[in-house]
Amino acid sequence: MTELHQAAASGDFDLVLDILRKNLCDPNQRDIDWNGKTPLHWAAAKGQTETARILIENGARPCLRADNGWTPAHFAAESGRLGVLRLLHSLHVPIDKEDCSGDKPKRIAEIYGNNDCVRFLHTAEKECEQYRKMLVLKCTHLDDTDDEWEDPRREQDQGRAAKG
């Protein structure tokens, strides 16, 4: 775990900002000891809304996934961090991606009994879908895919289809 990961998890906004300004750590670095979590995953899980905002403003990609396919929205939903979910949605972050088990953040919030998050995500998922459709019509790209995570899954699917 890097110093940036630790600062993001603890909500040390000033240290996060200092590390980012000095370019001491890639905001998208995955922590191999902690299932590929990025600093943004940690900030989301711990409810560090302003830290999450500064990470994103400084290049953290909110579409990156941990080993199990969780996005920052999954981690926020698990721990009932409605403020983080609101921030992610306001920045047009994909909050409706499925993890390895096919669960979206809304389902994770349901499992953990975070009903405020469930209600919010119910509406936000629809808005997220509408936003993506609007971008397609405008021929604009949304950074919503973690190729490093998804490429091996595509290869597996192609291999199954070839055998099928």
Image (cartoon, helix red, strand yellow):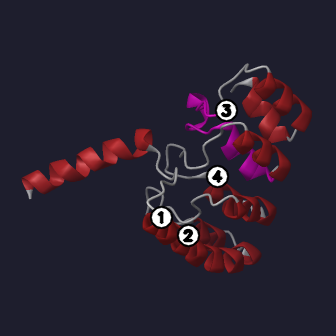
In front: label 1 or label 4: 1
Q: State left or right for residue 139 relative to residue 47.
A: left
Q: Callout 3, which amino acid?
A: Pro
Residue 131: give its label: 2
Residue 27: give its label: 3
Circle 1 SS class: loop
User: Which residue is tagged 1?
Assistant: 138
Q: Residue at point 76% right, 58% down?
A: 84
Q: Callout 1, which amino acid?
A: Lys
Quadrant location of the N terminus in the rendered image: top right
Q: Sequence order check: which comes first, mark 1 or mark 2?
A: 2
Q: Residue at point 79% right, 19% down?
A: 22
In front: label 1 or label 3: 1
- The residues bearing labels 1 and 4 have C-alpha atoms spaced at a distance of 27 Å
User: Which residue is tagged 4?
Assistant: 72
Circle 4 SS class: helix
Q: Sequence order check: which comes first, mark 4 or mark 3?
A: 3
Q: Residue at point 63% right, 61% down?
A: 92
Residue 23 picture quarter: top right
User: Which stretch is magenta?
Assistant: 27-47
Circle 3 SS class: loop
Q: Position of residue 128 (x, y in %)?
A: 57, 70
Q: Sequence order check: which comes first, mark 1 or mark 3?
A: 3
In front: label 4 or label 2: 2
